[in-house]
Image (spheres, rainbow, N blue to C red):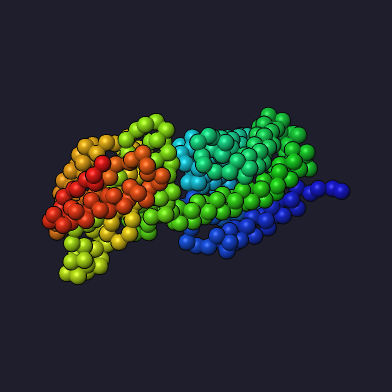
Amino acid sequence: MTLDVQSLLVVMMINMVALSLAFPAIMGWQVSPAARWAQGAMLVQTLGWICLVFSRQSPALDPLLSAASMVGLCVGMAMLWQSMQGWLGPRPGGRLVWVLAVLTPLGYALGFGHYPFRVGWANTGLALQMAVVCMALLWPGAQAGRGWRLIMATSLAALAVATFWRGMLGAFYTPLYPSLRAPHPVNIVAALLSNLTVVLNAVGLLVAWREEAERALHTLARTDSLTGLLNRRALHDEAGTLIAQARRHGDPLSLLVIDVDHFKAINDTRGHAAGDRALCLMAGTLQAALRRGDLAGRWGGEEFCVLLARTAPADAAAFDARLRTTLAARARAELGFDLGFSTGLAELQAADADLQPLVQRADAALYAAKAAGRGQLATAPG
C-alpha cells in the first residue's frame, strides 16, 4: 500500500474540522477558561491545516496561505499550552511558547523566498513549541490524572522529533527534501504522527475536561453556594481528621459557633440581598482570619462554625475579638450598616468522640451570649 502525503494531509484537515466542531458540541459553550483555550486551540489549528492543504492550489496565494497556516499551527500550540496551565496549575515555558508563536510565522513569512531557511526555521520553531507543551504536561505538582498527560506528551514528543528532523533535512539536505509533499519517509512519518497526535490529544483534552467537571461537582457538594465556605456535612467530615490529630498529639482544639446578630431584622428592613451580602462579608472576614489547618463552615442560616487547631480557649477568645473588630470596620465601609455577632466557645474534651458534643456545648454557650445581650462571647464550662 502506497501512502500519499497529500492524502494524509487532507485526512488530517478533515479530522481537525470534525474535532473543532465536536469540542463545543460535547463541552458546551459555558466552560472554564482552560476548556475555552482548548476549544480555541483546536479551531485555530484547524484553520491552519485548511490553509496548508489549499496553499498549493494557487501559486499566487501560496505565500499568504502558507504563512497563515504557520500562524494557525503556532498560535494553536501556544493556546494548547494555556489550556494545560488552566487545568494543571502554573507551568513553565509560557513566555517561550508565545514568543515562538510570533517569531516562527514571522520568520517564515519574511524568509519565504529562501526555501532552506523557511523550512528549517518553521519546523524548528514548531518542534520547540511541542517540546514546551510536553514539559507543561509532565511538570510535577498538578492534581490531575497521569494517563492522559503521558499519552499527550508521548505523541507530541514523537511528532516534535519528526518535525525537527524534517526541518533539518529541508535546511541542510534540500535535494533530499524538496517539498512538504515529497514522498520522503520523514514526510510520511510526520503526516501519520500528525493524524495520530490530533486524535490522542483530543482524547486527552476531553479527559482533562471531564476531570475538571468531576472536581467542580465534588467541590459543589462540599461547599456552601452563597458564602464559599464548607457546608455542614463537609465541615463535620473534615472535623473528624482535625479532632483525631489533636488527640494524637495532645494539642488543644477550640470550636467557635458564631451567630450574626439581628439577622432577621436585616432581611426585614434592608431586604434579602442585603442579608446575603452580610453573610458573604462575614464568611470572607472569617476566611481571611484563619490559619493553615483551621476550618470554617456555614452551619446553617446565619450561623457559622470555626474549628481552631492547636488553640486553647484564651487564644480562641483573642481570635474572636480580632474577628469582631475587623468585621465591624468592614461592615461600615462595605455594607453601610453595622454588623456584629454572638459567639459560643467550647474546648475539645477527652470524652468527645466527634464534633457533635463540641457543637452542643458551644451552642449552649452561644445562647448564653445572646441572653446576656448579644455582641459578645460566652465560654462553655470545662
Quick check: 153 left or right of 278?
right
Q: Residue furthest front?
A: 351
Q: Residue at x 75, y 53 (%)?
A: 7
Vertical position of residue 268 compared to residue 48: above or below: below
Q: Which quadrant of the figure has residue 124? A: top right
Q: Residue furthest left?
A: 373
Residue 58 pos. (x, y %): 66, 55
Quadrant (top left/top right/bottom left/bottom right) for the C terminus: top left
Quick check: 202 left or right of 308?
right
Residue 82 pos. (x, y %): 49, 45
Please indicate, yes or no, whether residue 112 appears anywhere in the rendered image: no
Residue 213 pos. (x, y %): 52, 55
Closer to us: 347 or 342: 347
Q: Residue at x 55, y 60 (%)?
A: 27
Q: Residue at x 33, y 47 (%)?
A: 358
Closer to us: 237 or 35: 237
Please indicate, yes or no, whether residue 73 appears anywhere in the rendered image: yes
Q: Residue at x 18, y 43 (%)?
A: 321
Quick check: 253 left or right of 208?
left
Q: Residue furthest right?
A: 1
Residue 284 pos. (x, y %): 28, 50
Number of marks present in the image shown = 0
Closer to us: 27 or 145: 145
Quick check: 349 left or right of 109?
left
